[in-house]
Image (cartoon, rainbow, N blue to C red):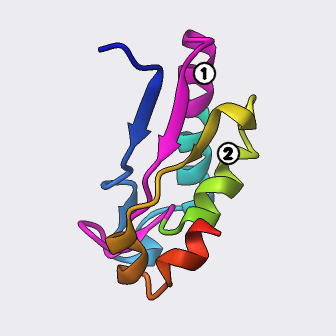
Amino acid sequence: MGTNKLVLWLAREGTYIREAKNARESVNLIVEAIYKLLAYDKEIRILIEPKPNEPMDHDYIPTIGLAIALAYRTIDEKRVGGLIETAHCILAGLDPSDEMA
């Protein structure tokens, strides 16, 4: 398709009931998957699109801040970033302009 960017919308990476899953283990699995993607293609850039509460009630990466924090846990944080969807910021009760600053 002529692009090196891959958008991850982690829509099902969360839970309806906090106690149902181990959040730390779940986030570690996301980091492990990103490691594999980065190792597979040295040119790929991964953009995480956070969405706070849909379709899961409690998403593991609900904000751009957490997406950036997740990037720093990978093997190459310069190739992992966030994709800001303004409506998703509003769903989280955040101001999109602050998220883009």
Q: Look at the image and tell me in which quarter the C terminus lies.
A: bottom right
Residue beneath the point at 27% across and 69% down: 54
In the picture as drawn, the residue positioned furthest to the left comes out as 55
Does residue 1 appear to the left or right of 59 in the view shown? left
Q: Classify 81 as above or below 74.
A: below
Residue beneath the point at 66% across and 54% down: 68
Mark 1 element type? helix
Label 2 or label 1, whichever comes before in sequence order: 1
Does residue 24 appear to the left or right of 97 in the view shown? right
Q: Is residue 24 magenta?
A: no
Residue 8 point in image, percent of width and height: 41, 42
Q: Which residue is mark 2?
A: 71
Does residue 67 appear to the left or right of 60 in the view shown? right
Residue 16 point in image, percent of width and height: 31, 74
Residue beneath the point at 63% across and 58% down: 24
Residue 39 point in image, percent of width and height: 63, 15
Question: Mark 2, residues whose alpha carbon is within 10 Å: few (<14), some, or many (≥20)?
Answer: many
Does residue 27 appear to the left or right of 59 in the view shown? right
Q: Amino acid at mark 1?
A: Leu
Count of numbered circles in the view: 2
Say if mark 2 contacts mark 1, CB within 8 Å.
Answer: no
Q: Classify 93 as above or below 97.
A: below
In the picture as drawn, the residue positioned furthest to the bottom comes out as 93
Q: Is residue 41 magenta?
A: yes
Q: Classify 24 as above or below 34.
A: below
Mark 2 → mark 1, Cα distance in angstroms: 11 Å
Q: Amino acid at mark 2?
A: Ala
Q: Look at the image and tell me in which quarter the N terminus lies.
A: top left
Q: Which residues are magenta?
A: 33-61
Question: Mark 1, residues whose alpha carbon is within 10 Å: few (<14), some, or many (≥20)?
Answer: many
Q: Which residue is mark 1?
A: 38
